[in-house]
Image (tube, rainbow, N blue to C red):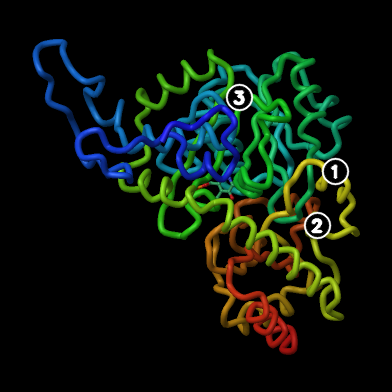
Amino acid sequence: MKLTSRARFSTICLHAGQEPDPSTGAIITPIYQTSTYVQEALGVHKGFEYARTQNPTRMALEGNVAAIEGGKAGFAFASGMAAIGAIATLLKSGDHVVVSDNTYGGTFRLFDKVLTRYQLSFSYVDTSDLGAVERAFTKTTRLLFVETPTNPVMRITDLRAAAELAHRHDVRLVVDNTFASPYVQRPIEFGADLVTHSTTKYLNGHSDSVGGVVIAQRDDDIEWLRFVQNAEGAILSPFDSWLVLRGTKTLPIRMQRHNENGQALAEFLAAHPKVQHVYYPGLPTHPQYELAKRQMRGFGGMLAFELGSLEAARRLLNTVKLHALAESLGGVETLISHPASMTHASVPPERRQEIGITDGLVRISAGIEDIEDLKDDLSRALDAV
Ligand SMILES: Cc1ncc(COP(=O)(O)O)c(C=O)c1O
């Protein structure tokens, strides 16, 4: 199952990082549920000593996601937050980071409540405005941490221009690619140095595992991340690695349907009289529609819409039946949520207002159900608003 250098995306998703199991020929990489490995003699072993440091199931996943993102190496962690925490260890006391202003609430919490205790500083900027990004850079800026599209108001950052700007200032570009997935967008192709995912979302895709990955391109980062993954030990378990590896096999066909359903729901909502505004990069009314078309393959399964008040949002959320009221995203089943009180509750209310996360904003992670059933469900719920 050797991949040629010309292998295309779907083939890479299915096969990269995996070989038939050497002991049985099993086509699927087994779950190596072991804590240690027996050595043949003192100092003689098969390259596996202890399972925090090396695990064949995790290593298969790491090779797989590295190839999927077009990076040199991948590292799998116990959660998306653990992956972002590992990236933060590239920083030293005194360093500064520029971050997308409506980044995932948990990322903001880690930066603002934990990492500021270690003499690290963060500036939150609308990274879709690269002039503002450049003005925020200081002599101590080391990372530009970007989410695009942003959660939940779907602002887009021009990744190629962001990478050029960052590199001119000797800053690394880090992209949290969770929201788009690598089917829709591959930041390393645009010049990103590091890509991270919560594999909990599209990469695993089945809402049954929590995990994270970092994909790196620079040799010094790869060396450091390998060291830190072992030193801090926040590794992804063999079973979760196996689940995500199974998930990435179907990433392309799942994403095609997520894209279709996301687009169809955005168009349906945009035409509905009770909806004041729809945030989706695949609508020509999106201010960065042209950039999204250049940078993304399809526009993803995430969208948000404004109903005008908390009461309207509450009625809708309490009436839908097929849309499951839940945090998270990127699974095969459609989820609906209220960012202000759920995913972004840890963001102070004034900042939420600035970003556009109002009390009337509702977010959808479009799953892969039949689109007509999703529209019927929303239509019924909107009648109750
Ligand atoms: C964009 C983004 N990044 C990171 C995370 C954190 O991932 P995890 O929940 O797997 O720790 C999330 C979780 O929702 C997310 O949406």
> Residue placed at 67% from the left, 22% from the top?
172
Where residue 357 sits, quadrant-wise, is: bottom right
Question: What's the residue type where badge 1 is placed?
Answer: Leu
Q: Are marks 3 and 2 in contact (CB under 8 Å)?
A: no
Residue 317 percent across, percent down from the top left:
63, 77
Give the answer, above or below, for where 110 lies relative to 350: above
Looking at the picture, tell me which residue is in the foreground, 254 or 131.
254
User: Label 1, on which residue?
Assistant: 291
**Foreground mark, 3 or 2?**
2
C-alpha gap between disc 1 and disc 3: 32 Å
Mark 1 or mark 3, whichever is nearer to me: 1
Percent from the top left, x then y, of residue 46?
Answer: 21, 20
Question: Which labelled disc corresponds to residue 120?
Answer: 3
Specify the label residue 282 is tagged with: 2
| Percent coordinates x, y for residue 236 in the rendering | 37, 40
Which tag, 3 or 2, sits closer to the chain's start?
3
Q: Secondary structure at mark 3?
A: loop
Residue at 62% x, 17% y is 94
Say left or right for 19 vs 126.
left
Number of other residues with Cα within 10 Å of mark 2, as a class: few under 14, some 14 to 19, many 20 or more: many
Q: Secondary structure at mark 2?
A: loop
Q: Does 265 appear above or below 156?
A: below
Does the beta carbon at disc 1 come under 8 Å from ligand 1? no
Location of residue 14 in the rendering, given as x and y in whole percent from the top left corner: 47, 45
The three-letter amino acid code for the residue at tag 3 is: Leu
